[in-house]
Image: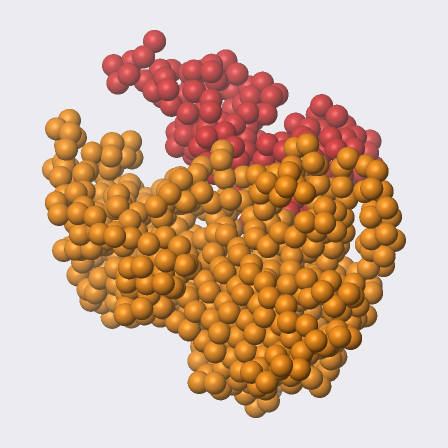
Chain colours: A orange, B red
Amino acid sequence: MTDRQLVGKPVPRKEGRDKVTGQARYIDDLHFPDMLYGVTVRSNAPRGRIQRIEFENDAIPWSELTVVTARDIPGENSVALILLDQPYLADEFVNHREEAVLLLAHPDRHLVEKARRAVRIEIEPLPAIFSIEDSLNRKEVIWGEDNIFKSFQVEKGNVDEVWEGADFIIEGEYQTGAQEQLYIENNGVIALASPEDGVTVWGSMQCPYYVHKALLKLFPLPEEKIRVIQVETGGGFGGKEEYPSMIAGHAALLAWKSGRPVKLVYDRAEDMAATTKRHPSLTKHRTAVTRDGKLLGIEIDFTVDGGAYATLSSVVLSRGTIHAAGPYNCANVRIKSRAVATNAPPHGAFRGFGAPQSIFALERHLNKVAATVGLTPEEFRRRNFLHEGETTATGQVIHEKVDLNGLMERAFELSDYYQKRESFAEANKFSVKKKGIGFASFMHGAGFTGSGEQYLQSVVGVEATTEGRIRILAASTEIGQGTNTIFGQIAAEALKLDYDLIEVAKPDTGNVPNSGPTVASRTVMIVGKLVESAALGLKQTLVQGGFLTEDYTQENFQTACLAYIEKHGALKSFSQYKQPETIRWDDEKYQGDAYGAYAWAVYVAEVTVDPLTYEAHVDDFVALQEVGRVIHPILAAGQIEGGVAQAIGFTLFENVVWQDGRMANSQMTNYIIPTAADIPPIRVFFEETPYAGGPSGAKGIGELPMDGAAPAILNAIEHATGLSFNHVPLMPEALMLEMEKS
Amino acid sequence: MPDENGKCAVPCTVNGEAVTLHAYPMARLLDVLREELRLTGTKEGCGEGECGACSVLLDGALVNSCLVPILQAEGAQIKTIEGVASGEQLHAVQQAFIECGGAQCGICTPGMVLAAINLLEKNANPDETAIRNGLAGNLCRCTGYIKIFESVVRACQNTEAKS
Ligand code: FES
Ligand code: FES
């Protein structure tokens, strides 16, 4: 047996060659004969009642166009996700400016675009609300009885008893803005649909089975008549978690009515304005501490703006809530949270999923607490870090080896923190430009929250092909993060075969089992573990059937597979997720083991603030994390670098300008993300403490890097300027306002 | 001169092959490449000259093909991502992108590879600032650019090692 240690090696990305040669085919690169182009006509009012739809401009051959309204929907007019409140097409009422009302299709894509502009939807306006405050105050009730999609309360100890004995009580209020996904490939799908043949959708997406579930409600068809196929996807970040269900439904409705294939691909402006963004948030902190800097009690009030429909807000809220008290040991914690409705397009999943919002608030607030007590930010954290055996806010006992203080010290060494903290402060007295250094310490739970994974019961298959290769069957999608490659490594290592012998089947609901959605940093840790066990199961089948002995060569293995297939017709092995006995979660009380494992991290940012241009620039960034075993060092570092870059954008660049619930700057020209010239060196370091529950000891990693940069950067800006900013994005205008005052 | 459909004949060279394109005078080079020649490696990210996903080389200059009216391509030498490798042999930049993790989702990659090639043609050994500036017109939302910078450096090293 040769040594085929693959985990930990930077094997080439499976689809890398196709991507660098331009051969990879994304949805807009596909063309079907007889295909129509679809467009969406949207509401032009933030809230109101549809009065009339008129087709103006006689130059447009209206009779040649396929027109779909809510009346044409053959099944249920709601996008199935958690609640059924969001319609595919507004029928009577609209609840945000980008709500789809009507669909058009035509073979000429220029003509259909002209037609879109010629449809006039007359809407009688109803009062609308656009802010968390107005929603909480019920200035107008626009959803349910109280504008509240969901609320949670986490209780640990008794926070009511701590205030009296506290030496200090520190309060603070923190806000984060919406963030546009800005994957470089817009949302898009192609659909075929008819009552006889059913519905087939190809598209750019993260979760084929979510789309499948949604289409099953929209069309009166049996499960097997609906097929969803993911094609190469140009970035997701959460933005292609839920929205593809909407656009897939739209294209399928047009295809159903016209009897022809329909391509529906958004242009940039439409994608930016209409699809989901990161939830804006408002967090209030009240903290009790002793004179020597021990946390006595933490009270957190966390609100996210969900937009007009429930979508995934409850789950985003849940993750934000659980992460709100961070990796600190505090006996008394109360977290109250809620997701509220406003008349904006629904906000949705975006890398970090609520955690970046609540962690921003906490890591800014703790610096304020430390300063009040008279401690350095690091000393204060040192006195309160969570250790093995202690409990998180939900009462989860940490059984992992975790050494946050060690992690912090190493991050400080790597960034030269102590020395810079002093020398910058000294130099700032004389220099025009101000330099600062700051950090944040945090954790991120991998996998679905609480009982989520148990409920999902994900399945992965591994099969031997008649060509003597091994193919992985999973619905987990490759969206750039490296699913194909990592699954290949895990299976190859488990079976002791060459990496090149492993292929990964295209996620196609007609062909692969439901391994759950590609979200929540779960693909490696949860699904990867299933890949590992399905692969081992395949080997077991061969051994037990007498086709193979434990001590085999690759050739033996291939021969055995072929012999098995010859005799039994096919060789497949499936593995289904089973929640380990040790994980316990109480959904009612929101208590228990919120996540199977956490990644732990300390990020350090170094900034320069220019008092002439009011620009803050990140000069250096150290990202140190403990993520269990690293399966692929290049992909893992790439995840962290990409996440940090997005987080830098979230902090200093990316400002969604709202105008009555509509994104006014829905163009790349005026919604700015970091370019190659803006990004600092992002220096990534891993600590690897193998996690027994993950494949080869790995934990989740994808979302973590989104969490820590914003507070680290604002902490650094505070060090540089002495000014305390408590909102992101922090644009030059806000810096100017405060710097001129001081 | 437009024909009876209003389309113009535009002779040019694409990836070394002489072709005559037929398109409306205001058609974007991007669409003509993608639709008429089915060279779909050139991507549309924004359609307004901001993202660089549609980058191609036009007479050796890096341009955003979404901003180029087809008439400007008349007589030009155009290189798209499909023309970068010689047969099975990848270009040093492509090879480096694979080795260093310069491509994640891959949608920016064709444009990014062409931008990197263009940069190295002008400056065989760019320092970090030159790399950053050379790629500043091409947006990537996945990588945070670090692995792309490393890819460019690796491409230089690999090319040097060979020569
Ligand atoms: S599509 Fe041409 S620059 Fe974005
Ligand atoms: S690799 Fe996805 S945008 Fe660059």
Q: Above or below — where is A454 with respect to B39? A: below
Q: Nearer the viewer, residue A280 or A601?
A: A280
How many marks can you see? Answer: 0
Task: Report the side of A732 relative to A113 (left or right).
Answer: right
Identify the residue shown where x is 34% and y is 9%.
Answer: B1
Identify the residue shown where x is 51% and y is 79%.
Answer: A154
The C terminus of chain A lies in which quarter of the figure?
Answer: top right
Identify the residue shown where x is 31% and y is 59%.
Answer: A139
Residue extending farthest bottom: A581
Task: Report the side of A133 relative to B80 (left or right).
Answer: left
Q: What is the x, y in percent for residue A463?
A: 52, 72
The N terminus of chain A lies in which quarter of the figure?
Answer: bottom right
Q: What is the x, y in percent for residue B17?
A: 52, 23
Q: What is the x, y in percent for residue A219?
A: 22, 63
Is residue A50 visible from the viewing direction of this image? yes
Identify the residue shown where x is 60% and y is 60%.
Answer: A360
Task: Report the side of A93 relative to A430 (left or right).
Answer: left
Q: Above or below — where is A86 with respect to B109? A: below
Is residue A4 visible from the viewing direction of this image? no
Q: Above or below — where is B133 with respect to A412? A: above
Q: Nearer the viewer, residue A175 or B131?
A: A175
In the picture, residue A499 is in which quadrant?
bottom right
Q: Which of A121 and A71 is in front in this view?
A: A121
Q: Nearer the viewer, residue A462 or B132?
A: B132
Q: What is the x, y in percent for residue A33?
A: 29, 42
